[in-house]
Image (spheres, rainbow, N blue to C red):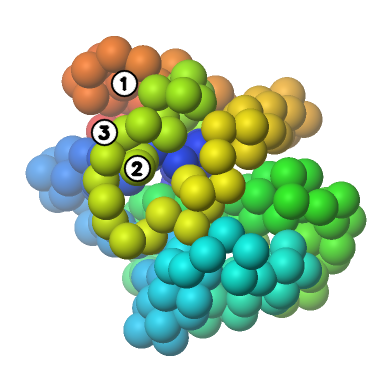
Amino acid sequence: MFISFEGIDGCGKSTQSRHLAERLGSRGQPVVWTREPGGSPGAEEIRRLLVEGAPGRWSAETELLLFTAARRDHLERLIDPALARGDWVITDRFADSTRVYQGATRGDLRATVDRLHSLMIGREPDLTLVLDVDPEAALSRGLARRSGEDRFEDFGLPFQHKLRAGFRALARDLPGRVHLIDGSGTPEDVAARVDAILAVHGAEA
């Protein structure tokens, strides 16, 4: 399976996606954990352009092109080969982030995002798990990391509220693939909720 984790900045998706990959690997399932933007050498180079620097560094349109270029390289060099081998792929973000961040939040670009995705990517995850958390708590957590990759956090709290609304809308619009998960509580609490969704889809970890 190809599973993506989504959500606002600081929601815990990186932790939960890694934990899922570890749980799958512990039972002998070949699994690849990856992230976006990034996941392949070329995409990691583009990542630095996107997540570092001032918030106004790029327009939403330029971001869309950069994200799509990174995703195409990621798909060609890591995701498609792994799935062809029969590995599971667990990714921290995929195209739904672009649909929300550039398509619905920073500009009215959703139709453009979907068209470009159809032309250049043409693949969706089998299952997408959106971790839903309070934006104020998530932003505090994200900024506390001081990772140097804070460009989107620096757009501020109103932006994070818009992101949350965008991800919730995706879950409403695509209920067969996109599932909203309460991201509050301990990492173990959230992991149990993740496993419950996987069990419904016959993909127990």
Instruction: Nearest to the eye among marks 1 and 2: give it.
Output: 2
Say which amino acid is labelled 2. Answer: Leu
In the image, 163 versus 173, the foreground residue is 163
Q: Is residue 98 above or below residue 56?
A: above
Say which amino acid is labelled 3. Answer: Ala
Say which amino acid is labelled 1. Answer: Val
Q: Earlier in the sequence, mark 3 or mark 2?
A: 2
The x, y position of residue 39, in whole percent, is 38, 70
- Spatial separation of the CA atoms under disc 1 and disc 2: 21 Å
Q: Is residue 41 left or right of residue 155?
A: left
- Spatial separation of the CA atoms under disc 3 and disc 2: 31 Å
Q: Residue at x 43, y 34 (%)?
A: 139
Q: Is any part of residue 52 visible from this angle?
A: yes
Q: Is residue 175 above or below residue 60?
A: above
The residue that disc 1 covers is 190
The residue that disc 2 covers is 143
Instruction: Nearest to the eye among marks 3 and 1: give it.
Output: 1
Q: Quadrant of residue 120?
A: bottom right
The residue that disc 3 covers is 205
| Helix, strand or loop for disc 3 | loop
The x, y position of residue 21, in whole percent, is 25, 47
Q: Is residue 194 above or below residue 143?
A: above
Q: Earlier in the sequence, mark 3 or mark 1?
A: 1
Which circle marks residue 27 in the picture?
none
Quadrant position of the C terminus in the picture: top left
- Spatial separation of the CA atoms under disc 3 and disc 1: 14 Å
